[in-house]
Image (tube, grey):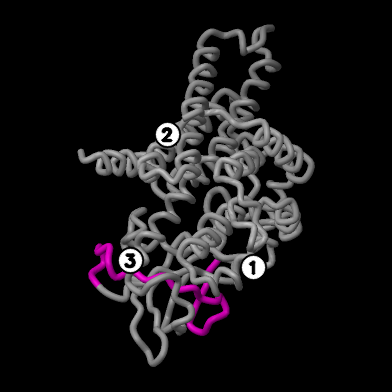
Amino acid sequence: MDLVLTEEQELLQQTAREFVTKNSSLRRIRAVRDSHARLGYSRELYSEMAKLGWLGIVFAEEYGGMALGYTDLMVVLEELGRGLMPEPLLSAVLLGGMTIASAGSATQRAALLPPLINGELRVTLAHQEPRGRYNPLHVETRAERSGDGWRLHGTKTQVLDGAGADRLIIPARTGGDVADRAGITLFLVDTQAAGLSIERQWRIDSRNVALVRIQDVYAREADVLGTVGAGAPPLAAAVDRATIGLCAEMLGSMTAALEMTLEYLKTRKQFGVLIGTFQALKHRAAKMYIETELARSAVLAAHKALDEGRPDVPQLAALAKARCSDAFVLIGNEAVQMHGGIGMTDEHDVGFFIKRARAAEITFGDAPYHRNRFADLHGY
């Protein structure tokens, strides 16, 4: 496996970098945070991303997509991570769109994917539950037969970009016990449905997440994605895809934090000399660089495995997330410490990266969870 980008992917990366640089400075991220707006991102910038074709990178051409690969999407997500952009490309494409593409019927794909790709329809996956602790197949939400449809009851937490979404994909149990793999069914539910309550919440990185309460929500038979009781495989695959995509964002963010720190080391003077000449700080900066490059290799390997349809995608997803969680937290901590007192203040931008690191670390599972998962998948 060649862990390098193609010339076309490098050009796409440069285009994405120019877009982020032009449209989303950290000053803009600060303004979005301070506005405390319910949506937490710009609809206009999201529409511009759709016009650039980014929402359709991995979708088939028949739906308006570009039929490219996950590695192509990776370079875009990495650049969004460099700018800490909160627009919901990851949730819309990897959690929502690709779940519809992989599990939905021909009718559902034809109706939902074109407006999703052009940015008019926003869909996300509401899979995490209060007692699930990262396990996407821990499903307590239940669906019971009601006439020609179903009645759903339950609670979903930390739903990425749930506030402002048009549809939610809700895993619910139509059979079996809480921890069973069999008996999970995926339902596509309109966010305006009676009995559905969406409460916007704010994490430390100010990103859009929601607490979703499901009280006697009606879903038609046509709202089922895939086969009743067989939703576990597409659900697990969706979370793995999104985990790998999040790692690309984290890679971009840790790279930006490293570059910001190196620039500071090259310009800040103490005792009449540049602090970048201090041996101890050189060693710490070298450690940050090494961790970034190790993470880069893991993230590239996971995306290429997705492109090749390899069976070890879950293992590489766990490897990449464990690696990126550890590396991003380390680099965020070091970046703040090397900036000294100013790094501890809210007025300096470096603090945004440590906050994003803390939130991203536990999204889709932290490093200990994924190390344990990696060992389990290898039979240990």
The residue that appears at 69% across and 46% down in the rendered structure is 30
Mark 2 secondary-structure assignment: helix
Quadrant for the C terminus in the image: top left
Disc 3 element: loop
**Outermost left residue:** 380
Mark 3 highlights which residue? 139
Rate crowding at label 3 as few (under 14), some (14 to 19) or many (20 or more) other CA atoms within 10 Å: many
Q: Residue at x 30, y 44 (%)?
A: 373
Label at residue 273: none
Identity, as a three-letter code, of the amino acid under mark 2: Arg
Question: Quick check: marks 2 and 1 in contact, CB under 8 Å?
Answer: no
Measure how far apart labels 3 and 2 are at the Cα level.
27 Å
Amino acid type, label 1 = Leu
Viewed as shown, does residue 261 lie left or right of 145? right
Query: Is 27 positioned to the left or the right of 228 in the image?
Result: right
- The earlier-in-sequence mark between 1 and 3 is 1
Q: Which residue is mark 1?
A: 121
Region of the chain picked out in magenta, as a range? 176-200
Q: Is residue 102 left or right of residue 79?
A: left
Which residue was labeled with disc 2? 323
